[in-house]
Image (spheres, rainbow, N blue to C red):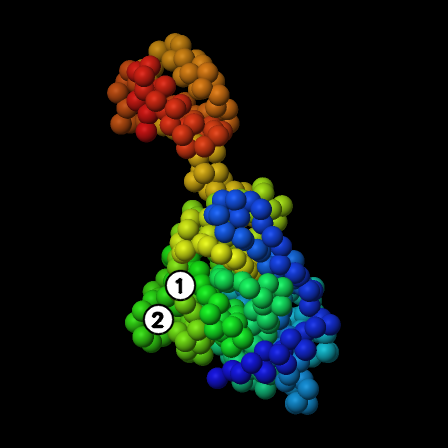
Amino acid sequence: MLELKDFEAAADRLKNVIHNIPLSTSATFSAMTGAEVYLKYENQQKTGSFKVRGAYNKIMKRYAEGDLHAVVASSAGNHAQGVAFAASSVGVKSTIVMPRSTPIAKVSATQGYGADVVLAGNIYDEAYAKACEICEETGAEFIHPFDDPMVIAGQGTIGLEIMDDLPDVDTIVVPIGGGGLASGVASAVKMLHPNVRVIGVQAAGAAGMKASIEAGHVISLDTAKTIADGIAVKKPGELTFALCSKYLDEIVTVDDDEIAQAILFLMERGKMVAEGAGAAPVAAIMNRKFDVSGKVAAVISGGNIDVTMISRIIEKGLLRAGRMTKLRILMQDRPGQLEMASRIIAAEGANVMVVHHDRTDVDLDIRDAILEITMETQDREHAQRVIDALRANGFKVS
């Protein structure tokens, strides 16, 4: 098991390498919750996420031991870039195996940090198998994304920094995928201040750590489905499981709608771009998944969101917040009906964005038509007023 000195040694290795990002107070979240909410913006870290901490700590420790000549990792995102950056900084060859489905931007970013990229398989497990094969063939060392003590120690330096910035913090909130960040932060913090509460947040569709702790042993989920790809892990590590079981106070889950809403909120109110995993702690705070009180520090773990996903995530967030509403209106197929519906919507102050009028659906009565409308609304209550007004004028709305 890790000791406090391991985290302190990691902090010493990292002190002249990573960005020192102090906690930022959030007036918005504080007003929303009644607590004092602080945010740790690791999306502004080198390579765009916290992952560089663990990768750098592991590689530098091994490099200092004098027998590290090459490293291999399997990842579709943040760990890939962290390993590539760390290895290139000391002149060690790195090979990153990524699934063929990895977005081109992430492949290019990893190559930009100096790694050789091998595309193999369609899912992470297949990329991992290829990485192990390369290690056997070349003698290169595999750098695990989370289940490694030195990787965990590197991630845990975030906990040390939070305690330095806010010694009287009551609660720290971190996302959980494989558990490297959560186990590191929880271990470091509890070793310093056992009374500080540490809450882990998982995506509801990929809550492998929560399920494992409830079962009392590591289990593997059948699927890990979530927009938060950074925490879409089926099976946590053995070491991370042991540490999370020992040190975490609670694990809560957030669904994809809640994550999307948090991403949107951070963009609009915080002027920050967070990936799904990074927004998960904020989603837990916004939806009060735990007792949000006292001084609360949330780790925004990364900002490497796929740009092709941003528009879909924003739309999902707008829909959940009631700021975008989609209606399906059944109306009589006669002149003036479309105009009447438009006038009602305008009178209620909504803004029509998309209109689709269909009279050819085979299930429709020959005298009816379907009007599908996407409109901009203020919130759910405003959307409901529009719906009520349409129904009051004889339209069937679903």
Q: Which residue lies at the image location 48% right of the left edge and 48% below the top edge?
A: 34
From the viewer's side, name the closer residue of 243 and 212.
Answer: 243
In contact (CB < 8 Å): disc 1 and disc 2? yes
Q: Judge whether residue 322 can be spotted in this image.
A: yes
From the viewer's side, name the closer residue of 181 and 31.
Answer: 31
Amino acid type, label 2: Ile
In the displayed structure image, the side of residue 43 where residue 237 appears, left or right: left
Amino acid type, label 1: Ile
Residue 344, horizontal then vertical, whole percent:
42, 16
User: Tag on residue 376?
Assistant: none
Residue 193, horizontal then vertical, whole percent:
51, 72
User: Tag on residue 251?
Assistant: 1
Element under disc 2: helix
The residue identified by callout 2 is 213
* Pointer 1 or 2: first along the chain: 2
Q: Judge whether residue 225 can be spotted in this image.
A: no
In the displayed structure image, the side of residue 135 where residue 360 appears, left or right: left
Disc 1: CA contacts within 10 A as few (<14), some (14-19) or many (>=20): many
In the displayed structure image, the side of residue 151 where residue 220 appears, left or right: left
